[in-house]
Amino acid sequence: MSTPTPDRRYLELLSEKFPTIQAAYTEVINLKAILNLPKGTEHFMSDIHGEYEAFLHILNNCSGVVRERVRATFAGELTPREQDDLCTLIYYPREKLIRLKGEGVPNPSWYYQTLFRLVRLARYLSGFYTRSKVRKAMPEAYAYIIDELLRASSVGETSRHEYHVRIIESIIEEGAADDFIESLSALIKRLAVDRLHIVGDIFDRGAKGDRILDRLALYPRLDIQWGNHDMAWLGAACGSEVCIATVVRTCVRYGTLNILESGYGVPLRRLYRFAERTYGQVGARPVGGDQVHGAFGGAGKNAISRAERAIDVILFKLEGQLIMRHPELRMEGRLLLDKMDLAAGTVVVDGVTWPLSSVDFPTLDPADPYALSEEERAIMDDLVESFAESDRLHRHAAFMYDHGSTYLVHNGNLLFHGCVPLEEDGSLRVVETPEGPLAGKAYLDFCERIARRAWRTGDQEALDWMWYLWCGWSSPFAGRVVKTFERAFIPDKTSWNEPQDAYFRLNEDPAACRHVLAEFGLEGEHCHIINGHKPVRAIKGESPLKAGGIVIVIDGGFCEAYHNTTGIAGYTLISDPHGLRLKAHRPFGSIEDALDLNADIVSETDRFEHAKAQLRVADTDDGVKIRRQIADLEALLEAYRSGEMAERRR
C-alpha cells in the first residue's frame, strides 16, 4: 500500500519540530536505525482475578524471562544456587536484602560483585532498545550514573573499566548500594519486557484486584482488554445499581470483603444488620480465613451466608427491573423470582421444575416480586452513595478506561477477553443495540462506545448495558447464560450448566477463526486470536492452542479457586524476536518462600511458533508507524531541497 504524501499544512507543522535539513535527515537516520533493532518482548496475562502475590511474582520474573537472561549471561560462571539468589534479588531487592543482612551476607566484596553482575545484565538487556528509551526507563535518581555504567568499554580499553570500578566503589563507600541495587533491579525488569497486555478479569474471586491496579499503574507500556468481571466493577464505578449489587454479592460470596471495606471504603454494616434481622439460619458457605472481617468479623460463617441471601434477593430484583426495562435484550428467561412456588418449595426454569434450597424470602411481595422493600431500597441508596464517594475506586476505573478497550489489534494478533458472538454456523451474530442491529467488529466497537458513555454521562441506558456486558448472552465479555440464580437457590448442580456462545466450540475450527480474524482486518499465517475467560483444563489434557494454533487461550486458572479444575496455576504468553511461546505455571507458594528458599514459580515452556529470522521493529506495528514518519520526513526534506519550503534557521 502506497504512503500518501503529506499536505503543505502538515509539512509546515512538521518543520516546527525539524526546522532544518540537518535536523530532518538526522531524525530519518535515527528512525531507520530503530527499524533494525530486535522486536521488543511482549508479555500477555489474563484472568488474574485478584491473586496479587502470584501476579506480582510473575510480573517480577517476567514469566521466566529474567531467569533465562540470568542463565544466558552467567552460564558457567555462577552456580545454579548463585543464579537463583541473583534472580530473587532482582524480583524482590528490598526484601531479599533484609534477609541477607540477617544472615550477615552483604559486605563490600559482595556488594561489588553483585552490582557489577546487575550492571552486566542491564547492559545486555539495554542492547534491545535505543539509548533514549533506556534512559527513560531508568530510575530518575540514578539515571546519569546508570547511563555511564551501561556504556561498555572496548577490548583493551582500561580507562573506562577503571572509571566504572571507581563508580561502583563510590556507591558502596557512600552507603547507597542498597538503593542502587533496587534501581538496577527495577531497570532490568523494565527492560526484560517491552509491553504488557492484560487480557481481562483483574477483579473478583481473589481479594486484591485493587492492589493489582496500583501495580499496573506503575507499568510504562500497558494495555488492558476488559473482562466481564471488570465490566461489573466499571459499571459499579459508573453508578449502576445492579452492577453495584453484583460486585457486593461476589465479594460476600467469595469472602473478599476487604477489597470493598478497606480497599475502597464501602461499608457493609447496614447490609449485615438487615440480613441478621431478616433471614433465618441458612447453610454456611466456607470463606477464606482473614478475608472475613469488618462488619462480618465477629459474626461467623452463618452471618456471611445470611448476607449473601440478602444481597442475592436484592440483586435478582434489580436484574428483573432492568430486564423488564429492556425487552430487546431478550433476557426474560432470567426472570425467575416470579417463577417460584414457595408453598411447594420449587421454581420453574425453562420449563423444568427444580426444588429450592430454601423458601425463606421474607421481603418478596408476591404481587410485585421485583420491587425492593423499604429497607432494601435504603441499603442500595447507601451503597450507591458509598461507591460514588470512593475516590480510589474512581481513580482505578479512570485508569482502566484510559488503558483499556473491548479488543486490540496489535502486531498481527487480535486480543479480546471472551468471544466474538457467533451463530452455530459460524456467521457473526447480529445483536440489537440502541444504534441498530450490529455484528462482529461493529458490535464490539459499539460495546466500547456504550461502556465509555456510561463513564462519561451515567445515563440509565448506558448503565443498564454495563450489566448486560457483564453477564448477557450476546456480551463479548461473557458469551454465556450466567446462572447466578440457580447457583444461589437450587442445590441440584445440573441446573447450573451455562449454555455458551458458539465461539467456544468454533474456536477449534480454523476456517471459523480465520473468518473472525478477517473481520478485524487480519490475514496471514502468523495472525492469532489471543483470549482468556474460559479456563483451560490442562489436567484433562485440554490444550490452550486451538484451531491449529490460530487461537491461544491463556486462562489456565490463575485464580487459586481454579487450580483443582485446571491442574495448573495459569498460562502466560511471551512474544519475542524469535516467535511465540506459552508458559504453563505451577502454583506459587508465597513471597516468603521465594525470599527464603529461592522458590520460584515453576514454568514449562512451549515454543509453538518459531520466526524464520529474528523479528525486528520493522516487522511490528511500531515499524509501520516509523516508516510513515520516515516518509513524512523525506517529503519535508524534498520540500526543503526543492525550495518549496525555507529552512527555519535562527
Image (cartoon, rainbow, N blue to C red):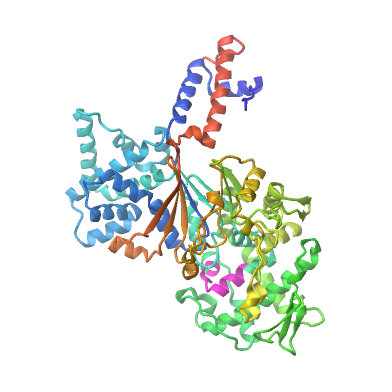
Query: Secondary structure of the magenta portion, mostly?
Result: helix
Corner quadrant of residue 308: bottom right
Q: Is residue 164 left or right of residue 302?
A: left
The magenta span reads 247-261
Q: Residue furthest right?
A: 367
Q: Is residue 363 visible?
A: no
Q: Is residue 45 above or below residue 356?
A: above
Residue 255 among those drawn in magenta: yes
Q: Furthest residue to the bottom?
A: 343
Image quarter of residue 648: top right
Q: Nearer the viewer, residue 106 or 565?
A: 565
- Residue 340 is situated, as x and y percent measured from the top left of the image, at 75, 82
Determine the residue positioned at 33% across, 46% down.
Answer: 69
Residue 150 rendering spot, x and y as whole percentages: 31, 36
Residue 316: percent from left, percent from top: 70, 73
Residue 401, given in percent of the width and then of the height, sits at 60, 51
Is 203 above or below relative to 90?
A: below
Total number of numbered discs in the rendering: 0
Q: Is residue 266 magenta?
A: no
Q: Nearer the viewer, residue 85 or 611?
A: 611
In the rendered image, the quadrant that contains the N terminus is: top right
Question: Can residue 144 be seen in the rendering of this structure?
Answer: yes
